[in-house]
Image (cartoon, rainbow, N blue to C red):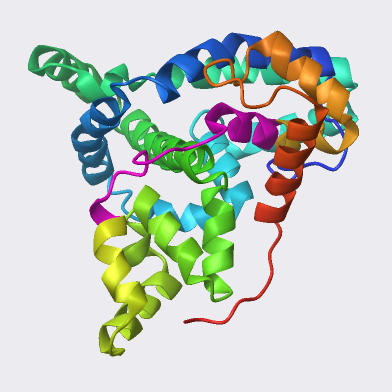
Amino acid sequence: MAQIIVNSKDPIVPLHVVEKLLKTAVPDWEWFFFSPTLQPMLASLHSPMNRVIKNLAIQGYPRLYEDERKIVASCLLGVCTLDQIREFSTEFEGATLEERGEALDEFSSELSQMGDVSVFFMNRRQLIVLRREFRALPLEQQRLAIQQARYFWSGMIATYHQVLSLVFHGEKMTTLIAKAKLGDDQSLLKAVQIDSRVLYEIPYFAKRYERSQLEPNSSLRMSLGYRTFGAPQHGRIRHRTAWLTLAILDWLGWLRHLSYPELLRLFDASGIGSATREITDETSMGKIVRMYWERHTLAPMSTQ
């Protein structure tokens, strides 16, 4: 299933389903990512998110960044059993575009309900009630609930950072990780700025960090301090929601099949970039699409 719905070369759902998704989500994206209170809103998530990571013992979730399919698979295993995923995959492969669109729409709705971040901000009374309900479950159901929660929140937290990376760097975390492993220290620094846990949970990053400590006048070592503690949203960041939209179109197999005029009409209809209006014609659309493909193309680089 994850193989089918990650960066397919051909459309996997009808375009009207994509348009519906964007028209529903874009107003929230535009409000959130261009809000003057963005930094405190992001900061407010750190403490409760860290509690979820600690309580579920999912500190190793950054390893999902090494393969985008693993992020999707982790989210799926949080809501379905392996047998259900296999059954759904078989049905999805044989379904028409319209049937796939209906299935994806239904699954997205279920996933968004489970991924409600209000769970991060429950008060003490709510947590006590939740704990009591959990302990009333049979032991086997408790075990299954914990296992599914670990899969689900590992996938969702990785997805959250994947989105942040797209919005603030115009590149997925999965791409930054892959480029860093090819020797691109700038990609390593960008990834650390989005999620500093990669320094300790991904072996290459840990080894590269250790090596930088032994290098005299290491530019990587000097930059890591700022990147680790510097908020990614500092500075002028262009095309925030546009990068996210292109990634979704790529993910659903439509980006290669839409012309610049068609993309421009889709962006205008969905309100993408309405906060800045930086993509106003086919020339500016062509420029950002080419930039997207360039940023997500892997090429070996020498380590400085």
- Compared across the picture, whether 260 is left or right of 44 comes to right
- Compared across the picture, whether 33 is left or right of 45 comes to right
Whether residue 5 is situated above or below residue 265 in the rendered picture? below
Residue drawn 38% across the image and 34% down it? 149
Whether residue 139 is situated above or below residue 2 in the rendered picture? above
Residue 170 sits in quarter: top right
Residue drawn 53% across the image and 71% down it? 184
Residue 161: percent from left, percent from top: 43, 42
Q: Is residue 167 magenta?
A: no
Residue 51: percent from left, percent from top: 20, 38
Residue 302: percent from left, percent from top: 57, 82
Residue 38 in view in this figure? yes
**Residue sitting nearer the eye, 50 or 286:** 286
Q: Which residues are magenta?
A: 228-248
Residue drawn 70% across the image and 39% down it? 288
Residue located farthest toward the left when viewing the structure as drawn: 124
Whether residue 30 is situated above or below residue 247 in the rendered picture? above
**Residue sitting nearer the eye, 5 or 292:** 292
Q: How many marks?
A: 0
Residue drawn 66% across the image and 15% down it? 21
Q: Is residue 239 magenta?
A: yes
Quadrant of the drawing holding the N terminus: top right
Residue 224: percent from left, percent from top: 30, 65
Residue 102 in view in this figure? no
- Compared across the picture, whether 93 is left or right of 225 comes to right
- Compared across the picture, whether 283 is left or right of 190 comes to right
Residue 143 sits in quarter: top left
